[in-house]
Image (tube, rainbow, N blue to C red):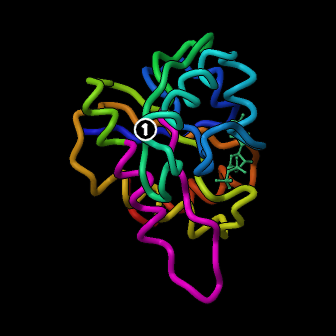
Amino acid sequence: MTRIELAQGDITEQQVDIVVNAANSGLLGGGGVDGAIHRAGGPEILKECKELRAGPLQDGLPTGQAVATTAGRMPARWVIHTVGPVYAKREDRSALLASAFRESLRVADELGARSIAFPAVSAGVYGWPLDDAARIAVRTVRETPTSVELVRFVLFNDEILAAFEEAVRELGA
Ligand code: ADP
């Protein structure tokens, strides 16, 4: 059984096997969680991302997919970079957001990880409404078969934490 936990704080400080990065397709850094992870983890992460871009991911990481690198100087062992969709009013991209969580768990299983911390993917610069982003995140993790024992959502502020608490109440996670 996978345990789902909610925590407020900074994802870069989590003592888990994996921290998930809300990356962009380019994989070469950005703002928000992405910037924080590269700052905290140091240059080794960017180096591996550049190698991925030079090799298997020449066109970047497609939306909804996930790939692992070292976590550099962070307490975690690996970073899984995933790309959530940009929110769009006129198009339902929720399957891609669910895929970002599902694919991250699949890569975590490949690595044999037991614990993983997710940020609120797509709920920052990518503009996803918080309550919907939280429901998709919690529901997808609940419905995805995985050997990961602990999934911790690390939420950056009160508002996003409240949205996840509500989603957990609603879905009974
Ligand atoms: P996206 O581009 O997928 O929307 P962002 O990084 O802009 O990703 O934001 C995703 C969520 O992560 C937002 O709720 C943002 O407040 C939060 N966030 C930003 N920095 C951190 C951090 N260091 N730890 C955890 N969450 C963070």
Name the residue: 33% across, 33% down.
108
Q: Which residues are magenta?
A: 80-104
- Tell me if residue 96 is in the magenta stretch: yes
Front in this rendered view, residue 122 or 64:
64
Type of amino acid under label 1: Val
Vertical placement of 46 versus 144: above or below?
A: above
Front in this rendered view, residue 57 or 92:
57
- Tell me if residue 82 is in the magenta stretch: yes
In the image, taking residue 149 as reference, residue 72 lies left or right, namely right
Coordinates of residue 52 in the picture (x, y in percent): 48, 33
In the image, taking residue 5 as reference, residue 158 lies left or right, namely right
Ligand 1 under 8 Å from disc 1 Cβ: no
Q: Does dot 1 land on a helix, a strand or a loop? A: strand
Coordinates of residue 94 in the picture (x, y in percent): 48, 72
In the image, taking residue 158 as reference, residue 137 lies left or right, namely left
Front in this rendered view, residue 25 or 117:
25
Image quadrant holding the N terminus, namely top left
Coordinates of residue 103 in the picture (x, y in percent): 35, 48
Name the residue: 45% across, 57% down.
64
Q: Residues within 10 Å of mark 1 (few under 14, many from 20)?
A: many
Location of residue 41 by image quarter: top right
Vertical placement of 146 versus 19: above or below?
A: below
So how many labels did they put on this image? 1
Coordinates of residue 65 in the picture (x, y in percent): 42, 51
- Residue identified by numbered label 1: 67
Name the residue: 65% across, 64% down.
130
In the image, taking residue 25 as reference, residue 129 lies left or right, namely right
Name the residue: 62% across, 10% down.
73
Location of residue 127 by image quarter: bottom right
